[in-house]
Image (cartoon, rainbow, N blue to C red):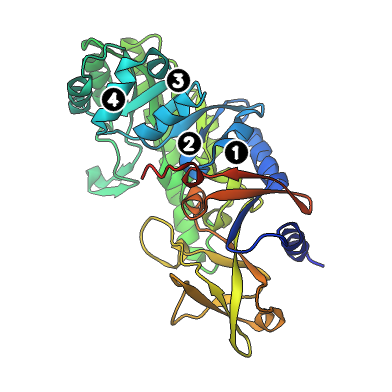
């Protein structure tokens, strides 16, 4: 029996009492992935990216392990909810226009001490001040650096369009603007190199593209390491008490951790290891989060139909954004239908061994987005479900 076949037997046995659709997290794989992230971080703490987990119980499980510290959240409402729930160090990774949230933040000392907000423009400070509604708490601020690689005098850009702050002088100027403004304090810098951390460099069947990605990423790492160090020096000249410099992501943990200027690493997807992280040379993880759909039809030889399954991931539309049939091995989508909103036909010889009601296990393309489809995650240890925990959705929250 192959390792994947053994996993299928375990998951089928553990969830035999549960009707599909159902989502699980294999805790042995989750913990092994957490250990691998810590190893690659080389002693620097890992801040857990909540959008890639979206389950409080599993955020707490990761943070209980040595090597993890703090949460990186994705909306202000989520940040406040986590802080009210007992999380003491929450870094909001994106600027917000949530006026009601800012009014709450600036009126509550506990929230203001636990949550750090992201800015890259003085106009964001003005929005926060206008939203205070009498709240006088000092707002902890993190400045975001644009990490994109710019070539040919800026005519070519590689990387996400995030912050407008690219140079050390630009970031230092914003730090000075914050320092002059009552009610705010710069405590950190964030620089997420998504074109390194979030782009696979070993795509099956595409050797030329994969080599080009590796060359681009090597150049980007060199350029960013030098520029990030210069940014940190420039900001520390304005804010000597800077608390943290955050960088990286699951795909670049060891490279980012090697930079002296970086004090902590952000990662989250590496805990679940969705299918987009199969295409990396820098690490390999164990799929920990899966979902199952039930077989509801047998249209013919070599075909079964499962209920639902059309759970595409965010990003540029393409086949790599689709879930992938994982167990049993050898199933594939009908190219004329793909994964459907209500039903999904699957082709391949393993279909002939599946009966009505059997489970087909899938891996999502991305990590936490799976939890937007399920109220609960069933935690599997060995061949048994040992706990069932709510996702954000199961607690009544979607946030985005």
Question: Is 280 left or right of 30, judged from the image as shown?
Answer: left
Q: Is residue 285 above or below residue 3?
A: above
Contact, mark 2 vs mark 3 (Cβ under 8 Å): no
Q: Which mark lies nearer to you, 4 or 3? A: 4
Q: Quadrant of residue 154?
A: top left
Q: CA distance from mark 2 to mark 3?
A: 13 Å
Q: Which residue is mark 4?
A: 102
Q: Which mark lies nearer to you, 1 or 3? A: 1
**The C terminus is located in which quarter?**
top left
Contact, mark 2 vs mark 1 (Cβ under 8 Å): no
Q: Secondary structure at mark 3?
A: strand
Mark 2 Cα within 10 Å, few/some/many (few <14, many 20+)?
A: many
Q: Is residue 360 above or below residue 390?
A: below
Q: CA distance from mark 4 to mark 3?
A: 22 Å
Instruction: Of the two numbered discs 2 and 4 on the same chain, state the one appearing first in sequence.
Output: 4
Q: CA distance from mark 2 to mark 4?
A: 27 Å
Q: Which residue is mark 1?
A: 58
Q: Is residue 115 visible?
A: yes
Instruction: Of the two numbered discs 1 and 4 on the same chain, state the one appearing first in sequence.
Output: 1
Residue in the picture at 55% in, 66% down: 324
Q: Which mark lies nearer to you, 2 or 4? A: 4
Q: Which residue is mark 2?
A: 248
Q: Is residue 198 above or below residue 113?
A: below
Instruction: Of the two numbered discs 2 and 1 on the same chain, state the one appearing first in sequence.
Output: 1
253 and 330: which is toward the camera: 330
Residue in the picture at 50% in, 67% down: 309
Contact, mark 4 vs mark 3 (Cβ under 8 Å): no
Question: Is 267 left or right of 111, judged from the image as shown?
Answer: right
């Amino acid at each position: 029996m192959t390792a994947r076949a053994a996993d299928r037997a375990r998951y089928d046995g553990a969830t035999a009492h549960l009707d599909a659709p159902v989502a699980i997290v294999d805790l042995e794989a989750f913990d092994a992935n957490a250990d691998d992230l810590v190893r690659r971080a080389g002693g620097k703490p890992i801040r857990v990216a909540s959008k890639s987990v979206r389950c409080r119980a599993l955020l707490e499980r990761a943070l209980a392990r040595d090597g993890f510290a703090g949460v990186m959240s994705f909306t202000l409402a989520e940040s406040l909810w986590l802080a009210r729930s007992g999380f003491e160090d929450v870094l909001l990774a994106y600027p917000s226009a949530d006026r009601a949230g800012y009014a709450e933040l600036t009126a509550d000392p506990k929230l203001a001490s636990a949550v750090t907000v992201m800015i890259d423009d003085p106009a964001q400070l003005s929005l926060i001040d206008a939203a205070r509604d009498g709240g006088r708490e000092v707002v902890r601020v993190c400045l975001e650096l644009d990490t994109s690689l710019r070539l040919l005098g800026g005519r070519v850009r590689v990387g996400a369009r995030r912050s407008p702050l690219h140079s050390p002088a630009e970031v230092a100027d914003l730090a000075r603007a914050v320092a002059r403004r009552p009610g705010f304090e710069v405590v950190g810098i964030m620089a997420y190199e998504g074109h390194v951390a979030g782009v696979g460099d070993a795509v099956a069947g595409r050797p030329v593209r994969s080599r080009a990605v590796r060359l681009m990423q090597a150049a980007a790492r060199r350029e960013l390491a030098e520029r990030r160090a210069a940014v940190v020096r420039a900001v520390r000249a304005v804010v000597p008490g800077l608390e943290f410099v955050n960088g990286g992501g699951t795909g670049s943990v060891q490279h980012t951790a090697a930079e002296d200027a970086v004090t902590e690493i952000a990662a989250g997807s590496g805990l679940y290891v969705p299918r987009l992280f199969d295409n990396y040379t820098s690490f390999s993880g164990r799929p920990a989060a899966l979902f199952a759909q039930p077989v509801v039809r047998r249209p013919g030889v070599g075909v079964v139909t499962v209920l639902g399954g059309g759970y595409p991931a965010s990003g540029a539309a393409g086949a790599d954004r689709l879930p992938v049939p994982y167990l049993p091995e050898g199933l594939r989508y009908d190219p004329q239908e793909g994964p459907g909103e209500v039903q999904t036909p699957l082709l391949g010889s393993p279909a002939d061994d599946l009966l009505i009601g059997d489970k087909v296990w899938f891996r999502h393309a991305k990590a936490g987005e799976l939890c937007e489809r399920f109220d609960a995650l069933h935690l599997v240890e060995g061949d048994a479900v040992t706990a069932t925990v709510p996702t954000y959705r199961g607690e009544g929250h979607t946030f985005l």
